Amino acid sequence: MSIQLNSEQKQIFNRVVEAGFYADPGLMHSTFRRMRKEAPICWLEPDNYRPFWAVTKYADMKEVLRRSDVFLNAPRRQLFNIPTEQGMIERSGNKYGLALRTLTDMDEPDHSVYRNVTKDWFSKKSVAELASDVRKIAEEFAEKMVALGGECDFVSDIALWYPLRVIMSVMGVPREDEERMLKWTMELFGFEDEDLSRDNAKGDASEAKSAQATLNDFFAYFSAITKDRQENPRDDLCTLLANARIDDKLMPTLELMSYYVIVATAGHDTTSSSTSTGMLSLIENPGELEKLKSNSVYSEYFVNETIRYASPVRHFCRTANSDFNLNGTLIRKGESVVVFHPSANADESLFEDPEKFQIDRRRNWHMAFGYGIHVCLGQHLARMEIGMLFEEIFKRIDTIELAGEPKWASNSFIGGLKSLPITYRIK
Ligand code: HEM
């Protein structure tokens, strides 16, 4: 049985599709709190969007992600408004508007075949072998904070660049290309926020045009890398991808380019958003900062809590391929189901005082990395790099304070802080 929303609920709950909703964490959390309580699985029909089931409770989200045989990633993995979707269909030349075919657009059996290409590379054991390289990069950025002399914008000076340097070094992309990589990532994932988008495209078919232009640049860049790594193989992820064989053939161009795009971008924005949220949370909770500084045993818990608290991935979408009874609500074949990570990770039936930042939170089984077959491939790398950066920062820096108003990005897919001015005392 599905819950009928009254007009006030519809008006408030429909806001989950708006980019600006995620730039106001207070509004976001109070709305999700109401949704979990009043209508945890509800049918939303926001203006300008194709309707969908909104799933906000932890257990229901887990079930949707677990049942990847019913809830498919293709063809709608993310919410776009209708003009954007139409623009994407026109430009992509296929009826779904998919200019990419990344792991997150694939279902079984293809998904496993492609995921297996890099599965070992991203395993906990292999990532541990990257520790000394990542540690060096963390040291560099902590030193950069020292060189900045006690004042910086933690987002634009540190958090945006650090994960980018890590993932570029893992991929084997030269340092001099980092700037354009950052620009492309922000354009692809930040294009709802007018400060971050290409040509300030916003809210209509020009969004699709803008994203497509960025993708074309990305494709041209990685085509050259592919050629180089096929001719001059090295020990890096680009070499693995450029030479990977599926059914004894090199990867088809679309899937190969999409692989570069997902690894370069998924590993960057999400980690940088978590890092800056971690810093803000420590500033706002000095007791937690003291705990972290006093005992390194907290480092791992802190990282996990930071990622839960940040939940930088705001939603993912699935499409039912058959009728399914989701905890008493009938989802019909062909209907879209959207899961909201920040809501599940603040579900009071699982987390005590969920809106509190507590670095020693136990049984912190959040789903910021997703769940099931699509669970984040880069989670071990993300955890390691965030932990190392804070360890290196607190070896060099003593107290940290806010030096201005933090600003949140308007983005309904991957979000976080876009500015965090701080002052700090160097040891
Ligand atoms: C998938 C979150 C860091 C690469 C995902 C998904 C989430 C997520 C929620 C699931 C998508 C779905 O359900 O369809 C995060 C967060 C991160 C992070 C919160 C940082 C704190 C990284 C890093 C990489 C990465 C460092 C490195 C390359 C990927 C890839 C997928 C993925 C390739 C697709 C997996 C698949 O569909 O099988 N991530 N991610 N992520 N992530 Fe991450």
Image (cartoon, rainbow, N blue to C red):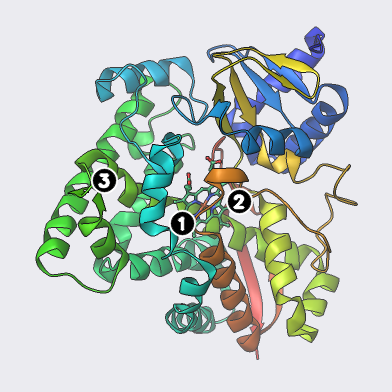
Cα–Cα span, label 3 and label 1: 16 Å
Q: Is tag 1's residue or tag 2's residue first in the polypeptide sequence? A: 1
Res 152 seen here: no
Q: Is residue 366 left or right of residue 395?
A: right
Crowding at mark 2 (Cα within 10 Å: few <14, some 14-19, many 20+): many
Residue lying at 25% horizontally and 69% vertically, measured from the top left: 174
Residue 267 tag number = 1
Q: Is tag 2's residue or tag 3's residue first in the polypeptide sequence? A: 3
Residue at the disc numbered 3:
257
Residue found at the far bottom of this picture: 427
Residue at the disc numbered 2:
369
Among the 4 quarters of the image, the one containing residue 40: top right
**Secondary structure category for the residue under label 2:** loop
**Secondary structure category for the residue under label 3:** helix
Q: Amino acid at mark 1?
A: Gly
The image position of residue 188, as x and y in percent, is 39, 41
